[in-house]
Each structure stands twice: as structure tokens, then as C-alpha cells.
Image (cartoon, rainbow, N blue to C red):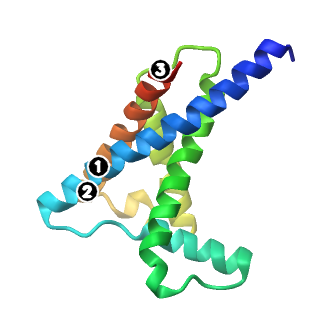
Amino acid sequence: MSHSNENSLIGGLARGVAAGAIGTAVMTGAQTAYYKAVGAEPSTTPAEVGQRVARGVLKRPVPEDQTGTLNNVMHWLYGTGWGALFGLTAAGREPGLGLGFAVTVWGASQVELPAMKLAPPIWENPDPKTLAPDIGFHLVYGVAVATAYKALS
């Protein structure tokens, strides 16, 4: 690997992490506005995933009073982690609009969460009222990540 390719991968990774954080912030804003508008509570699924990781890896649960913090930490780690992957794959080339990336991230959640028994498989939950907001949040995230990545390049 040439020195310029290494720099482009490292630069792509760094821009991806930053773009992932920006995308997560934009997605969080969209979720907050949506939940407030419809009078719903935000998802606690990130905390449930974090709780499973803490129990499995650290061999201890996170105290109940830390659920909100754990939810936020997991949400931000997931978003910036996917941003890092975006940056690695986009390094040295012009990324698209982020729609394909958004569908990939949403699709991954449709595999991960049912595998962890935290959500039903998609074919058991065909209700557009629950699927549409989730897909919409991921589209907002994907477009925000791609836009931020381009702006940081």
C-alpha cells in the first residue's frame, strides 16, 4: 500500500467518524422532533443492546438509573461506528447521496435486533406506522453522513 493510500484510508476513517457523529446528531434531532410531535417515547433498544453487551462482556449489568446514559452512549457509538465504515469505503472516491448506506444500516438492524430477540423479524411487523418512521430516521442519517463526509473532504 502506498503512503498516499494509507493517508487516504486514515483520512477517510477520520472523516467517516466525524460524519457519523454529525449524522447521528441529525438523526437524533429528527427522532426527538418526531417523538415530541406524536407524543411517543424514544426507543430504549440501544440501552437493551448495551445491557446485553455489559452482561456478556463485563459480566455485570448496568444499574437501572444509568439506562438513559447507556441508551445515548450506544446510540452514538453505533452511529459513529457506521460512519467509520462509511469513511473507509468512501476513502478516495466521491460518495453518493447516502441512500444506499442508509438502507444498509437499516437492513443491518433488521438482522441484528431480531437475532438478539429485541425486535420481531420484518415479515412479522409489516405495519407501515412503525416501519416508516424507522426507515425515515435511517434515511435522514444516511444522507446526513454522506453530506457531512463530502463537506469534510
Q: Position of residue 11 (x, y in %)?
A: 66, 25
Q: Position of residue 15 (x, y in %)?
A: 57, 30
Q: Nearer the viewer, residue 133 or 14?
A: 14
CA distance for labels 2 and 1: 5 Å
Q: Which mark is residue 32?
A: 2
Residue drawn where x is 78% and y is 13% of the image? 4
User: Which quadrant holds residue 53?
Assistant: bottom right
CA distance for labels 2 and 3: 25 Å
First of labels 3, 1 by sequence position: 1
Residue drawn where x is 45% and y is 68% of the image? 71
For the residues bearing labels 2 and 1, Cβ distance under 8 angstroms: yes
Q: Position of residue 103 (x, y in %)?
A: 44, 38
Q: How many marks?
A: 3
33 up-or-down from 72: above or below: above
* Callout 3: SS: helix
State which quarter of the image contains the N terminus. Answer: top right
- Disc 1: which residue: 29
Disc 2 marks which amino acid? Answer: Thr
Residue drawn where x is 14% and y is 67% of the image? 39
Farthest right residue in view: 1
* Callout 2: SS: helix
Disc 3 marks which amino acid? Answer: Lys
Horizontal arrangement in the rendering, residue 17 relative to residue 29 (left or right): right
CA distance for labels 3 and 1: 21 Å
- Disc 3: which residue: 150
Residue drawn where x is 64% and y is 21% of the image? 91
Disc 1 marks which amino acid? Answer: Gly
Other residues around mark 2 within 10 Å, as few (<14) / some (14–19) / many (≥20): some
Other residues around mark 3 within 10 Å, as few (<14) / some (14–19) / many (≥20): some
Horizontal arrangement in the rendering, residue 16 relative to residue 31 (left or right): right
